[in-house]
Amino acid sequence: MEIIKLKEINKVYRTREIETQALENINLDVNEGEFLSIMGPSGCGKSTLLNIIGLLDRPSSGVVEIAGTEADKMKDKPLARFRNTHLGFVFQSFHLINTLNVLDNVEVPLMYRRMSARDRHAAARQVLERVGLSHRINHYPTQLSGGQCQRVAIARAIVGNPKIILADEPTGNLDSKMGHEIMQLLHSLNTEDKRTIVMVTHNESQAADTDRIVRLFDGRQIQ
């Protein structure tokens, strides 16, 4: 069963002087529980595609259907609630808040839900245990290694129990050992927790270990 459906997606960026076609006629179905990699050279549209799937950007034309809902047609507030419920994000640069400790960083997505502080703390502690960082809850991002920061980011991505995780170069800022550990964690979330994962990567060996690879070139899907 498809949990993500993209139909004839086009994305055009326009300025007064120039028009750039970032994506052209993308059609893509992602099955529930699938681990999909998106690959291609820099500037080919990978992150743009991921942002459209993640409802962080809207296509110029086409349909984005997430979990049976045409989400790209929603207005901003319902869209934000839908995104918060259905999608978790992992970024290359972690995007942690340096003034918040680990526990508070993980709680951030839950601040937009009607949850008590006690329930937020409990949920955050549970996912930090899941990613092996329960002993670091009072530390700040500047006190952690890159791999630990990415584990915190993954905990934040899953704390709201989304069905879909979107990862943009999740090992891009890590050494090979830490990158391997993060990939093991993502595979665990896929196989054990049955989460659908869509990952942008330049790493051929990591992509080869996922269920399927979609390749882009100059904004077009070539595989």
Image (cartoon, rainbow, N blue to C red):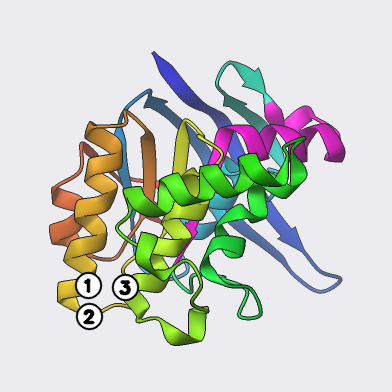
Mark 2 and mark 3 in contact (Cβ < 8 Å)?
no
Q: Residues within 10 Å of mark 1 (few under 14, many from 20)?
A: some
Give the x, y percent position of residue 123: 53, 42
Q: Which residue is mark 3?
A: 147
Give the x, y percent position of residue 67: 55, 21
Q: Which residue is mark 1?
A: 178
Element under disc 2: loop
Q: Is tag 3's residue or tag 2's residue first in the polypeptide sequence?
A: 3
Quadrant position of residue 151: bottom left
Give the x, y percent position of residue 92: 44, 69
The label number, if any, that marks residue 175 in the structure image: 2
Q: In the rendered structure, does residue 73 fall within the stretch colored magenta? A: yes
Cα distance between the residues tagged 1 and 3: 5 Å
Residue located at (44% from left, 63% from top): 152
3 vs 2, front mark: 3
Q: Which of 175/23 is in front?
A: 175
Residue located at (69% from left, 54% from top): 12
Q: In the rendered structure, does residue 67 fall within the stretch colored magenta? A: no
Q: Is tag 1's residue or tag 3's residue first in the polypeptide sequence?
A: 3
User: Which amino acid, by three-letter code, is at mark 2?
Assistant: Asp
Element under disc 3: helix
Residue located at (20% from left, 43% from top): 210
Q: Residues within 10 Å of mark 3 (few under 14, many from 20)?
A: many
Q: Quadrant of the C terminus?
A: top left
Q: Which residues are magenta?
A: 71-91
Mark 2 and mark 1 in contact (Cβ < 8 Å)?
yes
Give the x, y percent position of residue 34: 30, 30
Quadrant position of residue 118: top right
Q: Which of 59/96 is in front?
A: 96
As drawn, the residue found furthest toward the front would be: 118
Quadrant position of residue 24: top right
User: Which amino acid, by three-letter code, is at mark 1?
Assistant: Met
